[in-house]
Amino acid sequence: MPTREPLPTYQWIDSQSALRILSDRSHAIQTITASIFLTFFAPNGQSVRTDGAVAFSPLNKCVRLQTWKFNQKIFDLTLTPDGLWIEGPPDKNRRTEALRSGVSAAQIARILSLFGSDFFDSPDIRVSDTGGARFTVVRPLDHGQTMFAEVDRATLTVLEYRLTDPSGVVRFRLGLSRYVDLHGAVWPTKLIAVSSDGKIEIDLRDIELNGDIAANAFVPPPGAEKAS
């Protein structure tokens, strides 16, 4: 079971040593599965809270995120290197809002896939360090976008990812907190994503690290629509 004991701390040497540790940590995680509570906050202030489950394979850059409420599926999201699929409820009155929250959740899935096992291995990565409790890892992406990772210096845990457009405007933020020790690996149990579509909070529980995932876990369901 994950523990909430204090995370191990590291004696700072230099940024390249820190990147090697971050890379080694990410490569040690092959799969993550968990039950979740997901709350979607629309820009108008309305919110929807659902139960759900997530499966994540950093090596294959695959994410499956499902939510339901009162035993009815709200959305079923599958992200693979081949694209993104979202399945919403058959009820047309609930479908629009469900797909809106699904699109917002898709941003979380994309970020999860980006900070998979090779995020800290990119030859284009650089470190911005002005001292203090945090330093920033900067990685250029396609189409002029840039990903920033704010890292806690003491525990070498990522506190926030920011995605900016070519003009430097922040389009998406993902906060990570409540890290737990999973048999030597650390993983956040609280994710908060903020974008123009609203805010999503995800609380993870019953986390399993490097367990077996069903062969069809990342196969989109028959009713899913390909979004990209």
Image: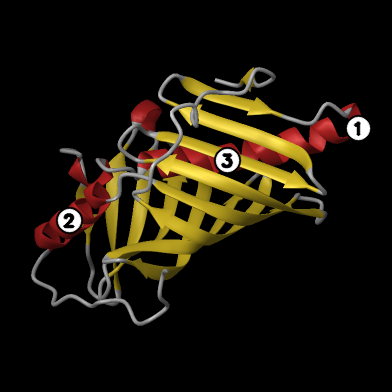
Residue 196 location, quadrant: top right
Residue lying at 34% horizontally and 32% vertically, measured from the top left? 60
* Residue at x 44% of width, y 42% of height: 56
Q: Is residue 110 left or right of residue 46?
A: left
First in sequence: mark 1 or mark 2? 2
Q: Which residue is mark 2?
A: 19
Callout 2: 10 Å neighbours few (<14), some, many (20+)? some
Name the mark nearer the viewer: 1 or 3.
3
Q: Secondary structure at mark 1?
A: helix
Q: Identify the secondary structure beneath mark 3.
A: strand
How busy is the neighbourhood of tag 1: few (under 14 within 10 Å), some, or many (20 plus)? few
Q: Which residue is mark 1?
A: 93
What's the residue type where badge 2 is placed?
A: Leu
Q: Say which amino acid is labelled 1.
A: Asn
Q: Which mark is residue 65?
A: 3
Please, is residue 219 above or below residue 99 in the view?
above
Which amino acid, by three-letter code, is at mark 3? Answer: Leu
